[in-house]
Image (tube, grey):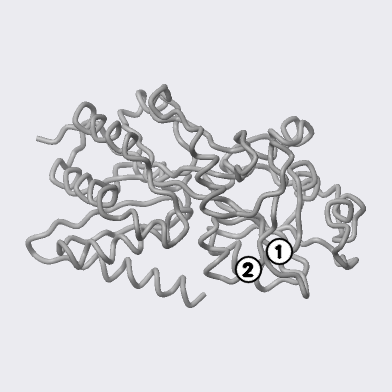
Amino acid sequence: MFLKTLLGATLVAASVTSAAAADISGAGATFPYPIYAKWADTYKKETGAGLNYQSIGSGAGIKQIKAKTVTFGATDAPLKAKDLDEAGLAQFPMVMGGIVPVVHLNGVKADELTLDGKTLADIFMGKIKTWNDPAIAKLNPDAKLPATAIAVIHRADGSGTTFNFTDYLAKASPDWKDKVGVATSVDWPVGIGAKGNDGVANNVAGTEGALGYVEYAYAKQNKLAWVDMINKAGKKVMPTVEAFQTAAANADWANAPGYYLILSDQAGDKSWPMTAATFILMYKKPADMAASNEALKFFGWAYDKGTEEAKALDYIPMPANVVDLVKKTWAKDIAQK
């Protein structure tokens, strides 16, 4: 909770700009909030320009950019090319990271439990109700699993993290695909809703027997026990930058219209199955050209100078060839004069 307060203070402080610098306004995904906060702080010190970013969830971010109340929207659930064209928006990926299941179980530490996609889906469907269920025990033969009830924690808001998480569950479980589906907000069969990655993290931290899903940086910052996964190749993997990078390496951004690309359940022995990108939405013909240009300056700086800060928070910077593609998109699609 302290970290959330600190990050919030960072963005508030960053939004106070000098008279010569324009304020950059954005809203949306909580998934990239830790790195956006760090970038905002560094960028403010280097340039004097501030970032006022509302970490309110991908669904709300899309609504705000469409309402033209912010210069950019941020979403982990990318819009398809048809939707972008209809709204007059351009979209580009900013950074990548991993979504991890997190637990609060007395005596259990990070990496001490393993799940697979079907078992995870069955838990979130309410089919598996206790931690000593045979399906969990089979994956964890050496663990002393209690009969504690599983308290499922999920997102209550429209969330790109949920979109990517449910996309993975649908690929792992035909039952989930048919009965629940994939969306930024679904009709959850069981569980308690919480707002934002931080809300899920706080609820898991305070609830014995809890299981939730958050972006990896939130798991680390809140010292939550994360769960290892059996990936598409049938291999046990830990959530690490290497595992995220391996999954992200399969991304063919050049052939993805509007950069629409989902990275869940990628092939590879070392691939983390819940890897995801987060995206920026901006108008091709913005009402406020100066603000749009300032935002592009910030994103260009983040691509060029923010890679080490991203890695320090366990995000994966976009590869250089993708950055080049994005900058060409800016020159072609987002008016800069």
For residue 90, what is the image quadrant?
top left
State the image coordinates of residue 207 (x, y, percent, origin top left): 72, 71
State the image coordinates of residue 176 (x, y, percent, origin top left): 75, 36
Between the residue at mark 1 and the residue at mark 2, the CA separation in whole angstroms equals 7 Å
Residue displayed at 33% across by 70% down? 10
Give amino acid for label 2. Leu
Q: Is residue 60 above or below residue 13?
A: above
Give amino acid for label 1. Val
Along the line of sight, which residue is nearer the eye, 89 or 329? 329
For residue 37, what is the image quadrant?
bottom left
Q: Are marks 1 and 2 in contact (CB under 8 Å)?
A: yes
Residue picked out by circle 1: 103
State the image coordinates of residue 102 (x, y, percent, origin top left): 66, 60
Looking at the image, residue 241 sits to the left or right of residue 73; the answer is right
At label 2, counting other C-alpha atoms closer than 10 Å, the crowd grade (few under 14, some 14-19, many 20 or more) is: many
Q: Is residue 322 above or below residue 45?
A: above
Q: Earlier in the sequence, mark 1 or mark 2?
A: 1
Looking at the image, residue 125 sits to the left or right of residue 254; the answer is right
Q: Is label 1 in a helix, a strand or a loop?
A: strand
Along the line of sight, which residue is nearer the eye, 237 or 263? 237
Residue displayed at 26% across by 66% down? 14
Residue displayed at 43% across by 25% down? 256
Q: Is residue 202 above or below residue 306?
A: below
Residue picked out by circle 2: 224
Q: Is residue 273 above or below residue 4?
A: above
State the image coordinates of residue 80 (x, y, percent, origin top left): 45, 27
Considering every residue shown, the one lying at the far left of the view is 20
Considering every residue shown, the one lying at the far bottom of the view is 2
Looking at the image, residue 44 sits to the left or right of residue 204; the answer is left
Image quadrant containing the C terminus: top left
Q: Which mark is residue 300?
A: none
